[in-house]
Amino acid sequence: MTRYDGARPVAVLYTGGTFGMTATPRGLAPDPHLREQIESLVTRSHSGETAPTWTYETTARAIDSAELQPGSMAELADGILEIVEAQHPVGVVVIHGTDTMAYSAAFAAFALADIDVPVVFTGAQVPLGMPGSDAPDNFAQAFAAASEGTPAGTWIAFGGRLLPAVRATKRSSRSLDAFAAPRPLAPGSSGTPPELTAALTRSAGRDAPRIGLVKVSPGLTGGQLAAALAECPAGVVLECYGAGTAPMTSGGLTEAVRAGVDGGSIVLAITQCADGPVDLGRYAVGSLLADAGAVAGGDMTPETALGKLAALRRTDLTPEQVRSLLAQNILGDREDAATS
């Protein structure tokens, strides 16, 4: 656990998003010059007391988070690591757009699995400086979380909630209480295995692979899944019905999964349900999915499944090693049918 000690700074990293947007003739766009406003927020949140030392960094380009790409997530995780290694902060606040915050934070949670300080993502539904903005309160909460004893790891501070990144999801496009973690941290997490620690160290500076997210629906065909795997050969998250079912006996889906896995891709099966894990052995069609080579994803959220798979595939670990790690509860990210 870390706590501000008067010497180590709080690092603030601005990436863009609604938080710092300003009006332009074409609508709201990220403001690349936000430092003065952040300074005012730090002063305001520590009125009557000495504010902690803090630093301010920006990514190469402030973006609308809807433009987030796998490479952006990798660059952000590497940037956070560089800040921690260079500045030795007590914690890091990451100002990020809300639309993809859960994806970016989940990727960072695994890419930075061994980081020894809290990394706290935050943002806003209403831009800073506009009436009714939630930016000041969200920033104050994130700054406090980064400096006042939050356990090391990756978090989202938003709307009065402090949520573990591996369980968080955006629940509303309009409410100021925009994020939730419907599933608590899964008990019995293993922590980061030594082989993953070494692989993560070696992966710094590499791009992140493109991971597909395919939602099972009536009429899904093997051709559609094969096309997704062709576009995203590192892997696809397959968001299944219920306990992990899909139309495996028609449309060539079984063959598409098997062909993808045989070719080195990973198919990670999760559930569309808000509660409960996949259990590929419960139904015959789920067993077909497992027999074809899909990995059961427990009760991982889509954001965490995508982030974990991308972070692991960014390393030089073999597909077999990645499959094994996906099946493990490393950061409280997944609970299985046998334990839920």
Image (cartoon, helix red, strand yellow):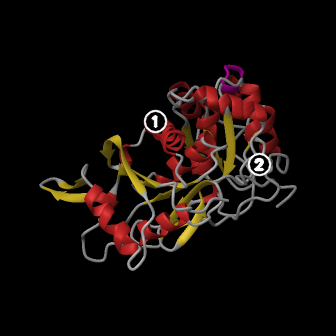
Q: Nearer the viewer, residue 313 or 32?
A: 32
Q: Nearer the viewer, residue 72 or 216?
A: 72
Above-or-below relation of 148 to 319: below
State the separation of the CA atoms marked 1 and 2: 25 Å
Q: Residue at x 50, y 36 (%)?
A: 78
The answer to which quarter of the image holds residue 129 is bottom left
Label 1 is placed on what type of residue? Glu
Q: Position of residue 85 (x, y in %)?
A: 54, 39
Q: What element does badge 1 sit on?
A: helix
Q: Nearer the viewer, residue 94 or 303?
A: 94
Residue identifier under label 2: 329
Res. 293 in view: no
Residue identifier under label 1: 75
Q: Residue furthest left?
A: 25
The secondary structure that dominates the magenta segment is: helix
Quadrant (top left/top right/bottom left/bottom right) for the C terminus = bottom right
For marks 1 and 2, give the one nearer the viewer: 1
> Position of 69 compared to 186: left or right?
left
Span of residues in magenta = 260-264
Q: Residue at x 47, y 64 (%)?
A: 143
Q: Residue at x 53, y 30 (%)?
A: 209
Crowd around label 1: few <14 · some 14–19 · many ≥20 (10 Å): some
Q: What element does badge 2 sit on?
A: loop
Quadrant (top left/top right/bottom left/bottom right) for the N terminus = bottom right
